[in-house]
Image: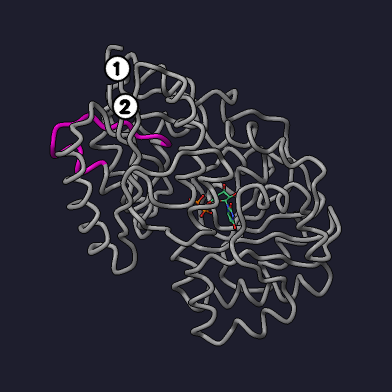
Amino acid sequence: MKIITILGARPQFIKASVVSHAITQTTSLQEIVVHTGQHFDDNMSDVFFTELGMTKPDYFLGIHGGNHGAMTGRMLEAVEQVLLYEKPDVVLVYGDTNSTLAGALAAAKLHIPVAHVEAGLRSFNMAMPEEINRILTDRISRWLFTPTQSAADHLKREGFAPASIIPVGDVMYDVALHHGARVQSNVRLLEQLGLDAGNYVLTTIHRAENTDDSERLDAIVLALIATAKTLPVVWPLHPRTRAVLKQSGRLDALSRVVHLIEPVGYLDMVQLEKFAALIATDSGGVQKEAFFHQVPCVTLRDETEWTELIEAGWNRLAPPVDAASLQSAITAALGSRGNDVKPYGTGDAAGQIVTWLRKGMGV
Ligand code: UDP
């Protein structure tokens, strides 16, 4: 039985690493990996294949840049060609990017069943491109692998057939367990940056709602500059964020007070996360990794899909409306801890997904 995995963005390489590994352990399944090209730099793409032990993609479509419609349309056309040629039994997609939607749509139009990993997440904010992608992908998927109870509840409320909703837990928890342990006491990167374990703030920003809104981005930048007066701040810059900061002339001022670095590989990122005093982010994955490594988190957004961490006290929302409130949210969260909860399954989501796919395909 042939599975085609469609991926293209950094978090998808990380999520797919554990599922692809589980597929290779199953002799009755063959996986073909299609990389759309949405993220293509070495440090946004190749490093994850190398570090997480994944085989190179079978197809690289080289599609990136442009407006959402153009990018998704080009992906749709190119993925369709691959599907027509390969004739897979199932198409596997991850998360909520344009690559997710294009892969799912190309498959559904060819009547190939779609399996969606990380189904059912909702921000209830239709201004987010991710929300549009995930709602549409869920709608045309046959198997909806949900990471949390709330994701399964959303799908039930939206009227999906109970049999199509499959709670497996979060594959990112699998990854954190598999690969996180490789970063025990290796603090090479901290040494290079001159940071002391437990004594810095790690930040990541990449969501369009923050990068494409100059008032929100200003609030974030000013809050981080203020924070850096008392605690070092390290910021691996997403290429989109770097471009916006550069274009608006903010990059130089920021680089004088904040450790601005290039995006790092997964193992370096885990190292930065594990030893941070606090993480301030708009990333979905990083919010959960903060919790996996028991580090307090401030989410620089108006809402989050990972509400269980807010309820448990590990995370709090700080909408980037003004610098002062952001800075006080960061200060207030320092040193805090949440409740002892386990909302993301047992760390075997990948194995469960493969078992379900085999069952679904009758092998
Ligand atoms: N990440 C990384 N290097 C970085 C920044 C993030 O390896 O410089 C990892 C991070 O540890 C997490 C994933 O990328 O596993 C999150 O991806 P991103 O924030 O791009 O997307 P999101 O999770 O918001 O969809």
Residue 107 inside the magenta-drawn segment: yes
Question: Going by the image, does 244 lie left or right of 67?
Answer: right
Report x, y in % for residue 208: 44, 65
Q: Is mark 1 within 8 Å of ligand 1?
A: no
Report x, y in % for residue 290: 67, 46
- For label 1, the residue is 360
Above or below for 38 versus 242:
above
Of the residues under marks 1 and 2, which one precedes in the sequence? 2
Q: How many marks?
A: 2
Q: In the rendering, which numbered label is found on residue 262?
A: none
Q: Residues within 10 Å of mark 2 (few under 14, many from 20)?
A: many
Quarter holding residue 37: bottom left
Write the residue at 31% across / 27% down. 143
Question: Going by the image, does 108 lie left or right of 94?
Answer: left
- For label 2, the residue is 143
Measured Cα–Cα span from mark 1 to mark 2? 9 Å
Write the residue at 33% across / 35% down. 32
Q: Nearer the viewer, residue 220 or 310?
A: 220
Q: Nearer the viewer, residue 316 or 178?
A: 178
Q: Secondary structure at mark 2?
A: strand
The amino acid beneath tag 1 is: Gly
Specify the segment rendered in magenta. 104-118
Q: Secondary structure at mark 1?
A: helix
- Name the image quarter holding the N terminus: top left
Write the residue at 31% across / 46% down. 59
